[in-house]
């Protein structure tokens, strides 16, 4: 009869043999605790509210500044296009003015409309001044004082 039990390890059921520890973790007994939510204190509520308002203010300020930046960029683009158009018109008008005031146009206008002609050598008159230019200052005799008379005397001698 012993031969039939060879495949079975009966030592597991023997109380006298110490059992080896298994890798079983024992949990502490379950306590029936119900977790309750703690009420927020007034200071915590005010702090959270202020942080929320500050966050909304920052986000709205960023959105508003982006809108303004976009509008200003569009205005700059429009004004740049307008400036380019005005510069083009200026260039065209400047070319027309230059064409009207060219030397050939002025010469033709002066000959046909005003009856002018080019200068001839017989029209040139030379003026010669043999004597240099002179200037004179008329000073009325005014009683200036003793020191003024001395100063004028010295300046007359030196000049």
Image (tube, grey):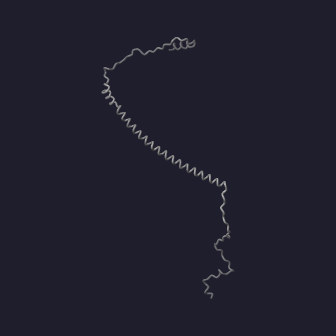
Q: Tell me where residue 136 appears, x and y as whole percent.
A: 46, 14
Left or right, 15 with respect to 144, comes to right
**Furthest-right residue in this view:** 16
Left or right, 112 with respect to 13, comes to left
Q: Residue at x 57, y 51 (%)?
A: 56
Q: Tell me where residue 152 appears, x and y as whole percent.
A: 53, 13
Q: Residue at x 51, y 48 (%)?
A: 67
- Quarter of image, res 90: top left
Left or right, 147 with respect to 88, comes to right
Quarter of the image where the N terminus is located: bottom right
Q: Say how many tags the image has.
A: 0
Q: Residue at x 48, y 13 (%)?
A: 138
Q: Tell me where residue 83 appears, x and y as whole percent.
A: 43, 40
Q: Tell me where residue 97 appears, x and y as whole percent.
A: 37, 33
Instruction: Please say if 17 is above or below 113.
Output: below
User: Residue 156 or 146: which is nearer the viewer?
Assistant: 146
User: Residue 5 or 48: which is nearer the viewer?
Assistant: 48
Q: Residue at x 33, y 30 (%)?
A: 105
Instruction: Please say if 56 is above or below 115.
Output: below
User: Residue 13 or 116: which is nearer the viewer?
Assistant: 116
- Quarter of image, res 108: top left
């Amino acid at each position: 009869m012993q031969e039939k039990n060879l495949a079975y390890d009966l030592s597991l059921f023997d109380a006298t043999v110490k059992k080896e520890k298994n890798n079983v973790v024992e949990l502490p007994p379950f306590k029936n605790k119900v977790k309750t939510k703690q009420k927020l204190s007034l200071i915590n509520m005010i702090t959270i509210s202020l942080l929320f308002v500050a966050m909304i203010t920052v986000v709205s300020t960023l959105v508003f500044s982006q809108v303004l930046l976009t509008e200003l960029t569009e205005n700059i683009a429009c004004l740049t296009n307008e400036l380019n158009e005005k510069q083009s018109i200026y260039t065209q008008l400047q070319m027309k003015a230059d064409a009207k005031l060219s030397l050939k146009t002025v010469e033709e206008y002066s000959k046909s409309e005003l009856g002018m002609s080019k200068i001839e050598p017989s029209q040139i008159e030379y003026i010669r001044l043999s004597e240099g230019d002179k200037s004179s200052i008329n000073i009325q005799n005014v009683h200036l004082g003793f020191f003024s008379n001395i100063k004028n005397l010295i300046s007359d001698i030196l000049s």
